Image (cartoon, helix red, strand yellow):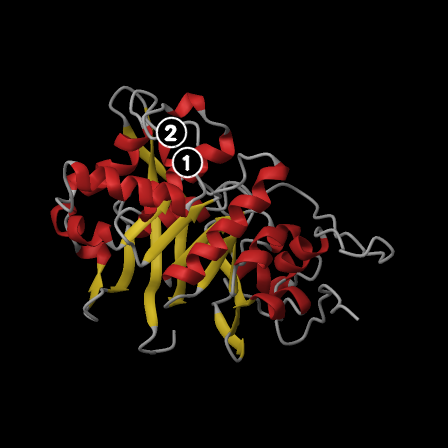
Amino acid sequence: MPAQNNIILEVNNLKMHFPIRHGLLQRVTGYVKAVDGVSFFIREQEALGLVGESGCGKTTAGRTILRLYDPTAGEIWYRRKDGVRVDLAKLSQQEMKPLRREMRMIFQDPFSSLNPRMTVKDIIGEPLIIHGIASGRAVEDRVAELMRDVGLDPDYMERYPHEFSGGQRQRIGLARTLSLNPRLIIADEPVSALDVSIQAQVLNLLAELKSRLGLTLLFVAHDLSVVEHMCDRIAVMYVGKLVEMAESERLLRRPLHPYTEALVSAIPPADPDIKTQRIIMTGDVPSPAKPPPGCVFHPRCRYAKEICKVEPPPLVEVEADHFASCHFAKEVDLQGIEAPG
């Protein structure tokens, strides 16, 4: 990965394997390789989209970066506000606490991520109290400010989560995330549980806050069209592996991995008169408890050859700032989205 001063997060060979236990003695009989050797980086004030099918490990990767899980292996280099780089993977939970002010998470489900017994004021203000930043009237003033920032009426701060719609609840969660003035936010499919009519409002709000507050964003999603709207670069995951990473427009116009090509082909064109050829992948997604040998995508890849079945392709920089994990990335001509006009 490039050694640049503006990189705020660099993940090297990150692994998160969950043990499979059986029998009365709960002996370990195998591992679910949810994240299996993932490497990527995020530049400061950049939005990186992490995409892939359900079960590919993208949410686990985000949670592991924030140390909600203890990684099995790998490095998570984070550049703190004072400029010092630290490996989060080696820190204890006590050492992580001050860093949690700089790194926050937006959870997928706005219904289960809010405590139904707490008022909005308590939900948003709790991080301020835990970290000793504010108390008393100062908490209420800060909560009112945050509610206005996310488009909510501060007069409603004494209400409970069940009194709000799904979109409003996600705004409450966003206000809670912003309460500590974070530098890095991991957004775990923040709009997938919302109605389509509400998704655009929340995405536009998030984009506006990112620009105004200078936030860095890891945006986890399964919808490439949403990621295209939000992110500067896109990283694609498949069965615990990172298979491609590039600037958003370049990846969508000229993918270098067959899996990315199939995902891109599923994006409906903006112009209904444009006819696209949908690529239907055969077979099922392999289990992360028993991934195939060689390239994890080879059982479903229409370009696979013998080497793909036995030798895992490394993630390499095929073109400037365009990384791909494919033996034939330089040879296969894959279809992307046609440029407008």
Say which mark, if any, is on residue 319: none
Q: Is residue 230 above or below residue 93?
A: below
Kind of residue at badge 1: Asp
Residues tagged 2 and 1 counted as in contact (Cβ below 8 A): yes
Query: Residue under circle 2?
Result: 156
Q: Residue at x 64, y 64 (%)?
A: 252
Left or right? Give the position of 148 relative to 242: left
Residue that numbered label 1 is attached to: 153
**Residue at image location 27% in from the left, 63% down from the top:** 78
Closest to the observer, 321 or 25: 321
Residue 34 visible somewhere in the drawing = no
In the rendered image, the vertical position of residue 8 relative to residue 61, given as above or below: below
Relative depth, front residue between 69 and 292? 69
Callout 1: SS: loop
Determine the image quadrant of residue 119: top left
Considering only vertical position in the picture, is 118 above or below 192? above
Query: For the C terminus, which image quadrant?
Result: bottom right
